[in-house]
Image (tube, rainbow, N blue to C red):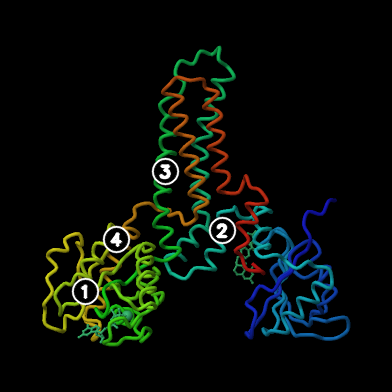
Amino acid sequence: MIKMFETIAAISTPIGEGGIGIVRISGDESFDILEKIFKPKSKKNVKDLKHNSVNYGHIYDENEIVDEVLVMVMKAPKSYTKEDVIEINCHGGYLITEKILEIVLKNGAKLADAGEFTRRAFLNGRIDLTQAEAVIDLIKSKSEKNLTLSVEQLRGDLKEKVGELKKKLLDVAAHVNVVIDYPEEGIDEPLPKELWGNLEEVHSECDILIKSYDKGKKIKEGIKTSIIGRPNVGKSSILNSLLKEERAIVTHIPGTTRDSIEEIININGISLILVDTAGIRKTEDIVENIGVEKSKTKIKESDLVLFVLDNSEELTKEDYDIYKYIDDKKCLGIINKIDKSKKIDISKLDKINNWIEISAINGLNIDKLEESIYKFILEDDIKNSSEKLILTNIRHKSSLEKVKDSIDNIFNTLNMEMPMDLIAIDLREALDSLSEITGEISSEDLLDHVFKNFCVGK
Ligand SMILES: Nc1nc2c(c(=O)[nH]1)N(C=O)[C@@H](CNc1ccc(C(=O)N[C@@H](CCC(=O)O)C(=O)O)cc1)CN2
Ligand SMILES: Nc1nc2c(ncn2[C@@H]2O[C@H](COP(=O)(O)OP(=O)(O)OP(=O)(O)O)[C@@H](O)[C@H]2O)c(=O)[nH]1
Ligand SMILES: [Mg+2]
């Protein structure tokens, strides 16, 4: 028999002091290795240990006892990788887990690459590529909403959707092939209405999914939000009140913040990457000037701009300059220092439709500010989205774009009454693009790309 895969092993828990450390082994030789290093208290033969059983005993290095452990045994194909899997639950700690891994390697296992267990789960057909990608997204999730999307994708929601789209195209392909193979049948209509419908549905579903990526990206990566305004209007004070800690230095001296400060907050399960910038003004100060230029770059990179003004002063030329600079960015106007008497008049700043009045110094309306941010950028965009699936992976998006292009070609062929063979080719391409998403068609390069972001032991 040709051996497909070597037996691999790795530490699956974070390295460091901890209650428990897990060394995971997967592959044909798992039990042979275990037999050489583990003595269960039950005195059972290691190869007779039951599937899904937890077994108390000791790990040995030759004749020397190394640790007291629990060993979990999962037999192929009922395991994470569909191979024989053994998990040694030892004491957590820098040295002990490493030591047990070394003993496992010494007895015949190969050190697993990053993501190799999950790669096996994919190669052995337990999960598709979208589910494998969901595993790493799930581990890396830092917001509730991203976590939810990852869990749904791991459950197979995207895989299922791709399957549905494929089925619709396969129905079309079956018909097209009949027309090509039996031209003498004299089928007048190149494509019955119902099959046109299939193509239209796949086209529009791809479109909806592609459009959902903007939201998905924001959910996955967080919403880049910069706090901008001229010096001394209270930008750093606003950052601090949103963070509920004294993170940025606040003084009465204009030009206090020289470099941008980045912090992440969570609003209703979504990450906001907040950037407090150096106040924008013309200045001769070299350091401050660099800060100002950086602020301008930050504005360009932002998904959302919080434009801060001082309630207690009239608008200045600097305010107007920044206002012009915002351009067509999504922008929420903040009038700060409402604890002081009002001198500001914003009637000329009519490009901005959303305003909120706050006082950062005593926390007035900070909760309303959070709510406005959420409503303004997140709720319209994310919560009210009617589509069930939201794409978070650019790879999926670009494959779906290819599917859409192929279908456009098919419509073109049909409208121009060109030969059916052309349709068959475009259908094949559309189906292949769908297969790329799930990994039914994949290359080593693609898999290396997907799994390179994984941690070792996953
Ligand atoms: N200790 C431990 N915890 C873990 C994992 C693990 O591998 N080991 N997981 C992963 O890293 C996650 C759980 N995911 C898993 C997914 C499938 C199977 C599995 O064995 N599936 C088989 C059989 C299920 C059964 O017994 O019926 C299957 O689908 O065929 C195991 C874990 C999270 N927690
Ligand atoms: N009365 C009042 N003062 C405030 C308020 N918010 C901030 N300040 C004061 O305004 C001054 C400037 O605040 P900062 O938060 O440092 O302003 P900034 O916009 O970050 O300033 P630069 O970093 O210099 O651009 C400080 O003296 C703050 O205490 C407020 O809501 N009311
Ligand atoms: Mg500041």
First reached walking from the N terminus: tag 3 or tag 2:
2
Q: Residue drawn at (74%, 81%), measured in percent from left and top? A: 56
Toward the viewer: 440 or 286? 286
CA gap between label 4 and label 1 equals: 17 Å
Which mark, residue 133? 2
First reached walking from the N terminus: tag 4 or tag 3:
3
Q: In which quadrant is the C terminus drawn?
A: bottom right
Between tags 4 and 1, which lies in front?
Answer: 1
Callout 1 environment at 10 Å: few (<14), some (14 to 19), or many (20+)? many
CA gap between label 3 and label 1 equals: 44 Å
Counting from the top left corner in percent of width and height, residue 237 is at: 29, 82
Compared with residue 135, is residue 361 higher up or lower down, i.e. above or below? below
CA gap between label 3 and label 2 equals: 21 Å
Q: Secondary structure at mark 1?
A: strand
Label 2 CB less than 8 angstroms from ligand 1: no
Q: Amino acid at mark 2?
A: Glu
Between tags 2 and 4, which lies in front?
Answer: 4
Between tags 4 and 3, which lies in front?
Answer: 4
Compared with residue 143, is residue 164 higher up or lower down, i.e. above or below? above
CA gap between label 4 and label 3 equals: 28 Å
Which mark, residue 309? 1
Residue hosting label 4: 330
Counting from the top left corner in percent of width and height, residue 342 is at: 11, 78
Left or right placement of residue 156 versus residue 123 in this view:
left
Q: Secondary structure at mark 3?
A: helix
Residue hosting label 3: 205
First reached walking from the N terminus: tag 4 or tag 1:
1
Left or right placement of residue 191 versus residue 63 in this view:
left
